[in-house]
Amino acid sequence: MASIKRKHLLLGCSQARVLSLAAAGLVVFVPFVAPQSVRAASVAAVVAQNKVITGVVTDPDGEPIIGASITDLNQLGVGTITDATGHFKLNVPAGTTIQVSFVGFTAQVFKVKEGTSTYNVTLREDQQSLNEVVVVGYGVQKKANLTGSVASINAEALANRP
């Protein structure tokens, strides 16, 4: 009984004293946090629902695409990029929709199937979107997002300069 009573007291103070301290702003109540074992079981259940998918992203010639974006369209902020060999690894739930994209290529969308964990994706070149890309310093911007002055020059103009 003493251990149960202690849970209702704050350092030996009565409940009325605790309430008066709380009203004065001198005591802050912290919500109950589940024990570690309960939280670990919940996390384990969520992880068990997910599966790791792997794969490689290539261009039509079979060359790996480095830095292609792989995103889960059903979960905001879940995604990865391909490594130097075009490989990727992503932990997602079965049945989710994945989008693979890279500048200058048409994005591919596929659904993660139960029982399939390896996906090899070939992106097709998109000439139209490549014309809408402007190289800026060390980065790349779409023409629609670019503000300021931009000048274009082609090889013919360079050859004809005095």
Image (cartoon, helix red, strand yellow):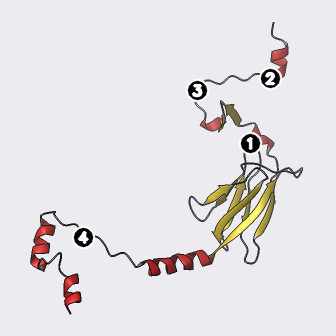
Q: Tag 4: residue type?
A: Phe
- Quick one: which residue is furthest to the bottom in this view? 1
Q: Who is closer to the viewer here, 61 or 124?
A: 61
Q: Residue at x 75, y 71 (%)?
A: 117
Residue 6 lies in what quarter of the image? bottom left
**Residue at label 1?**
129
Ranked by sequence position, the earlier of labels 4 and 3 is: 4
Disc 4 versus disc 2: nearer the observer: 4
Q: Secondary structure at mark 4?
A: loop
The earlier-in-sequence mark between 1 and 2 is 1
Give the vertical position of 54 relative to 105 (above or below). below
Q: Secondary structure at mark 3?
A: loop
Q: Residues within 10 Å of mark 3 (few under 14, many from 20)?
A: few
Left or right for 96, reference 122: left
Q: Tell me whether circle 1 and circle 3 mark residues in contact (CB < 8 Å).
A: no
* Label drawn at residue 48: none
Q: Secondary structure at mark 1?
A: helix
